[in-house]
Image (tube, coloured by chain):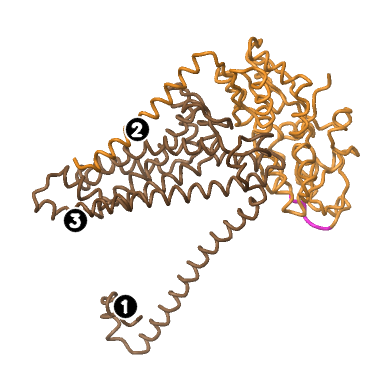
Amino acid sequence: MLEQRELAGVGEARRLVLPARAGARGRARAREGAAGLGAWAAALAVAGLLGWLVGEIAAGGAPALSWSLLAEAPADAGRAGGILPILVSTLLLVGVCLSVALPLGLGAAVWLAELAAAGGRRGRWVRASLDALAGVPSIVMGLFGSALFCRTLGLGYSILAGGLTLACMALPIAVRAAEQGLREAAGELRRAAAALGLGRAATLLHVLLPAAAPALLVGVVLGIGRAAAETAALLFTSGYVDRMPGSLLDSGRSLSIHIYDLAMHVPGGNHRAYASALVLLAVLLCLNALAGWMADRWLARAHARC
Amino acid sequence: MGSRGWKAGALLAVLAGAVALGAHGGRCRGAGAGARLVATGSSTLAPLMAEIGKRFEAHHPGVRVDVQAGGSSRGVQDVLAGMAGLGLVSRPLLGAEAAQLRAFALARDGIALIAHATNPLPGLSTPQVRAIFRGQLTRWEQLGGRPGPITVVSKAAGRGTLLVFLEHFGLQAAEIRAQALVGDNEHGVKTVAANPGAIGYVSIGTAAADVRRGVPIKLLALDGVVPSAEQIAAGRYPLVRPLLLVTRGEPGGLVRELLDFARAEGVDDLVRTQGFVPLER
């Protein structure tokens, strides 16, 4: 098996190894074995870390987990009652973030991958500003969002302001993932489409976007992850109110802020914090699974039609 | 454009519609009968104020009390900027602030020195505390305790608790020699609970509640007085800070009503459950 892979994949290396002595080859193989073992151990450690984390949160949160936790409003600063309004606020925040970041991000990615001149100055400039945006600490984003959306645009502490701030944070991730997907999908497919006489827009819509869908999905999932896990940026924008939001202009507490508040400011809130963290993990996994399912369906449709 | 394009377009339209509707709904309500009071500031005070707000809402249908946390200084700024009607401040007002704001006591909170539960020392004197936090005493055996280094846990700059602590012990922020800096009360408790040689200072309410729940910390007596709500109420424990509500100018209307409601006996039970000491009336 190893021999085959060596033959098939590492042709270059083999050509270099061949003239050397047999002993050197054996040593190289041993080194390869050690490297493989190391990689395997690293993978195991990563998986173990996740298992430990989930186990720790599950053990801490299980005593407080119940249906009423999901169905009631919080009471006694979060020590009693549930987290329903907080769950709703979190989903609304993610919804606002995605409905702004997705179209904008996809548009920017299409421009970068398809329309901007390769290696051109404008493309480079946009990419550099996206990377800078991706590196901005979330607390700075929070202050920016608070100044722009809450004060200047007059949205106050609101889910809308929080969602828009999150969109600013998710945007660079979404754009870079989508651009990567479009570029990888390009090449042969693009030439084939051109050979068939498809126009630029038709190629993009019917060939490139479906082919890039998995990468777009990765962007969406990463964006959701960043949005739903955010604390610092939301403290100043969507705020701290744990009431059921009546509209997007109401302040709403996200799950992550609820966890932070319970763990840091509410004596006796630890179990509830763990339980909320468990719910947050479950929500994230569900959103990811949903995104995967939707992409699969759309992909299947696209292929069926072709 | 294929049916997929249509669907994507429709989805976007629905989302945009939802956003617009939400925004519109919010505007209408803001302009209508429902009044909204905003209180922002100290994260120590925010959970208490949120509970008081809920009770106030129950007595005043149509009124919403929105509480936002973010630190005492933010409460001061938001009130001065007109972003909030009430500021939550868990430290005395600084010189310039006192001139611009009206302050009303909501409750009192003591600050307790805490150590790990296995620490045999029952308490410390004011000079000892000063020497420890200045880095002049660095080992527990110098105080007659179990041999080992002292890990000093202090609060990060800008925290209300830090200012009150410095003020009481006559220390400068630059003099403090700390091995660990913490933000919130629970953060301080968790740090000390995890370190048998640590000493820190946090809100008494927080510390006492954590001791009841079995967290391995102990409250150290200061100059022979054990920190507790009773000792604060009796005026014997010296390290106390005010929990304040601040307004810009003389409050009126609903803000006045909420202020009076929050300072009345009707919410003393809420003050106690959050670990603070009600006002003397």
Q: How far across and how far down the image is residue A36, in percent? A: 43, 74
A235 or B30: nearer the eye?
B30
Callout 3 amino acid: Gly
User: Which chain is drawn using brown?
Assistant: A
What residue is shown with label 3? A187
State how far apart marks 2 and 1 are (Cα): 51 Å
Structural crowding at the residue carrying mark 3, measured as other residues with C-alpha within 10 Å and reported as few (<14), some (14–19) or many (≥20)? few
On the image, the x and y values in percent for residue A198 come to: 11, 47
**Which residue is depicted at the point 35% across and 81% down?**
A1
**Local SS, label 1:** helix
Please give the range of residues in magenta: B147-151
Q: Secondary structure at mark 2?
A: helix
Q: Are marks 2 and 1 in contact (CB under 8 Å)?
A: no
- The residue that label 2 is drawn on is B14
The x and y percentages for residue A15 are 25, 80
Q: Give amino acid for label 1.
A: Arg
Above or below residue A297? Residue A156 is: above
Q: Marks 3 and 2: in contact by CB < 8 Å?
A: no
Chain B colour as displayed = orange
* Circles 3 and 1 on the same chain: yes
Left or right: residue B264 compared with residue A7: right
Give the main secondary structure of the magenta stretch: loop
Out of A34 and B229, give the one closest to the viewer.
B229
The residue beneath circle 1 is: A5
